[in-house]
Amino acid sequence: MGKDTTPDLTLGRLDELIRQFRRCMNVWPETPVEELPQDVIDSKIKKLESLEEVLLPKFKLGLGRLLRSLDLQKDATELPTPQFKSTITALQDIEETSDQICKYIQEVFFLSPVAEYNDFHLGRCKAFITGRAFQHTRELLEDELTGYFSQCRAFIKSWKKSKSAAEKARSAATKSKLESTFETGDRLTKMTNNFYQSVDSIIYLLQSSDYEILQENWREAIGTLDENIESLTRQTHHGKIPKSKPIQPDIQDEEIKKRSADLNRFIVLAKSVILLNKLARTLLNKITNDNPKKMTFTLTTELNSETLEDLLDIPRCFTLSLERLTKGVLRNITSNTLYSSEAEIQKSIDDISKQTDSLLVLLGFHLVPFDRQYDRRSIITNFPDWFRTWKEMWYEAVNHFLDALSDCQGEESGSDDDDHHNHNGHNPFNFRDGFSDDEDYYDDENSDDDENSDDDENSDDDENSDDEEDSNGGED
């Protein structure tokens, strides 16, 4: 009986496919399209439907057949018995389906007006949708698929070594090779699951409305804000902050008092940034609410791609700016020095406020209420009033931040004077009715510890910090 050549044929086929798909979507049209006749729009819509309902699900099935043909084992002591003829057939099916996916997505994306054109009338064929579908598909085929084929190749080569060792009855070598083959196959299984998720994300994109796509991206920004709030709250917890004690308690140590006063001011500044992050989160929670019973508005469908891109990018921009600000004030606490100049920090806050203003303007123009729930007298359903109130709260919180920033730059010798206490204690911030933030659980867990700092040598500063924490966490 001659040597089985199908493993080598399979390896050669995988090499061909890796070269083929590495740059499969690297062709661009010479000139952009400005107008589309209705028959072309209808054709594009059919192609998008085919991608969503037929080709992408078929692609997933092909991956499953490929994986089954390799006979991956759950037991590291078992030698797989791949069916390489089935593997080659599965690779052929994946290639044909991928070629069709590539062709359809290029036809839909390339022969469309670019985002700068007023393409609101194109519906699902807008650049906002087709551009994202093209980019995700390109990553799927050029990056993920070629990486997947490379892992299949690594598995087959490892399997060949395991089989050779088994045929030579080299038990020690066989065990080592089998473990290597099992690990390679395990990585391939995990890659397959990730691949399925990537395909599903493209299908979801093609099924989603403009508003649903925006909400999905806005939720990612909420995750960043959650991390900011958690980091700041934990760092400003009194139990986490080291407190210096003079070597001789009966001797007044001015340097220690000065460091403690500086630290307290930076804690107050950090808590004002917690408030800014919470307000930003409250805004994004409002516009990402997809509970049918609680939704009071939706996005108009007559938006062009340029406006949709603005709606998508602005929250991302001010969230990244808040993340940088958060990291800066955390450095203040750890280094006990202001991380940047007051002017630069003020400019950063001004930029964030301009971005939130721009978002509110766009939302005010393009959100439409659900008639069944719209009540002008209720701030919950009357979203223009909600936005106006949120904006007032935002600028009030910004003023808190700027006052705290000014204190950090002021005369350090006056950090414990009456003016400092009055500024932070007599103007508490409270979330207004209709703006409760249910996720602010850190304030509750910190409050008991904050009340136990009376015996510390810096008790006045600690009490002042507690007042500020209460004012910033009053929404609970």
Image (spheres, rainbow, N blue to C red):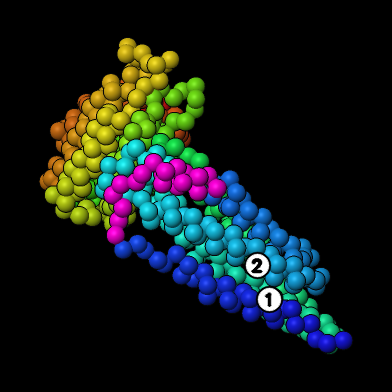
Q: Nearer the viewer, residue 162 or 60?
A: 60
Residues at marks 1 and 2, CA–CA distance in whole angstroms: 9 Å
Relative depth, front residue between 118 and 254: 118
Residue 225, visible in the rendered structure: no
Residue topped by disc 2: 91
Residue 436 is covered by the magenta coloring: no
Going 25% across and 25% down the picture, which residue do you hit? 388
The location of residue 204, given as percent across then percent down, is 52, 44
What residue type is disc 2 on? Leu
Q: Is residue 111 above or below residue 89?
A: above
What range is drawn magenta here?
A: 31-50
Quick check: 426 above or below 108? above
Residue labelled with disc 1: 10
x and y, in percent, of residue 337 in the image: 23, 54
Q: Secondary structure at mark 1?
A: helix
For residue 61, which quarter of the picture?
bottom right
Q: Magenta span: helix, strand or loop, mainly?
A: helix
